[in-house]
Image (cartoon, helix red, strand yellow):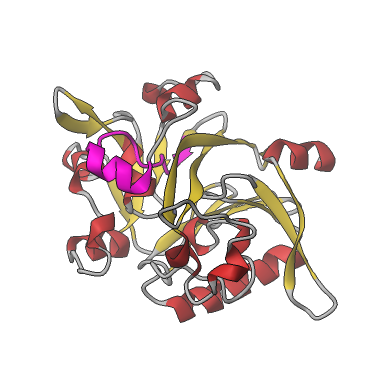
Amino acid sequence: MRLAGYEVVPIHSGDFKLDGGAMFGVVPKPLWEKSCPADARNRIDMTCRALLIKSSKHTILVDAGSGDKDDAKFRDIFSIEFPKGSVTDQLALHGVKPDDVTDVIYTHLHFDHAGGTTVLRDGVAVPLFPKARHYVQSAQYHHGLTRNPRDRASYIDANYEPVREAGLLEFLDADTELFPGLHLHTTSGHTPALQMIRITDGAKTLFFPSDLVPMAAHVPSPYIMSYDLFPLTTLNDKNRWLERAAIENWVIVLEHDPRIEAMTLSKDDRGRIIIAKSGDLSEFSQREQ
Ligand SMILES: [Zn+2]
């Protein structure tokens, strides 16, 4: 999809599975299992969908999936697989080499978002994108350092400390327009200072809400992950952002939905936010250009 001087391409960066109950919080399984069937270990299919954003000046990657540094036990628990190859393979399909990437935006530092930004070379984790400035909110980085027992399993030093040690990590302290038309907005329900990406030319808008709305099934208000540290913040922020997205007809790209890449929203006759259209991002480009 092209807008605001950018070409935006979803990048498949691996598949994995998470506990279906944890993905939908207080919502009972009979309600979620129709759209997201669970396997024998109660896990549902998920994907890691990064964004490649190219302009005349920048080659930007938003998140990079879990990467392949993890041991066999970790890969088995989360069923981490790369049926379409690595993030490097996927970038190559669009003519991008790791050295070409000028900027990496971490929505947050959980393993399924940050892991793919480092790779093992001779058993040592090193930055995969050695020429890129990597952006994270400082509140997110410092929260990771606390190693809170509730979410410390999500923070793995090898996924981002090599980036910091190489002098490539840049800390942000607020919402910002990082590049013209490319805005970063923070939300702190899932984890402190998660960054969402909004690209707009004033008429068309693309929104990448990361784990505020990981899958299409999370559009209804009560569908909130048990992983979220502050679910009522998620509830309020999700309602606020999806309301705006529905009114202004934004195209939303979903980071973790294995089947639905992008969607637009509308409201039903009771005022609830519902999905208007869903499909691959390229379908929205054709319809709207
Ligand atoms: Zn995630």
Please tell me which residue is depicted at 45% across the width and 22% down the height of the picture: 89
Q: Is residue 106 above or below residue 2?
A: below
Question: In the rendered view, does 280 fall on the left or right side of 82?
Answer: right
Snapshot quadrant of residue 191: bottom left
The percent position of residue 253, horizontal first and vertical second, equals 61, 49
Q: Is residue 139 magenta?
A: no
User: How far across and how far down the image is residue 55, in percent?
Assistant: 57, 32
Quadrant location, the C terminus: top right
Which residue is at a point 41% across and 35% down the rendered structure image? 81
Along the line of sight, which residue is nearer the eye, 215 or 35?
A: 35
Where on the image, by quarter, is ligand 1? Answer: bottom left
Q: Residue at x 18, y 61 (%)?
A: 145
Residue 218 can be seen in this image: no
Question: How far across and how far down the image is residue 186, in percent?
Answer: 45, 64
Residue at left offset 27%, top offset 64%: 151
The answer to if 61 sits in the magenta stretch is yes
Q: Nearer the viewer, residue 276 or 140?
A: 276
Can residue 105 be seen at all in this image of the molecule?
yes
The residue most toward the front is 40
Segment colored magenta: 60-79
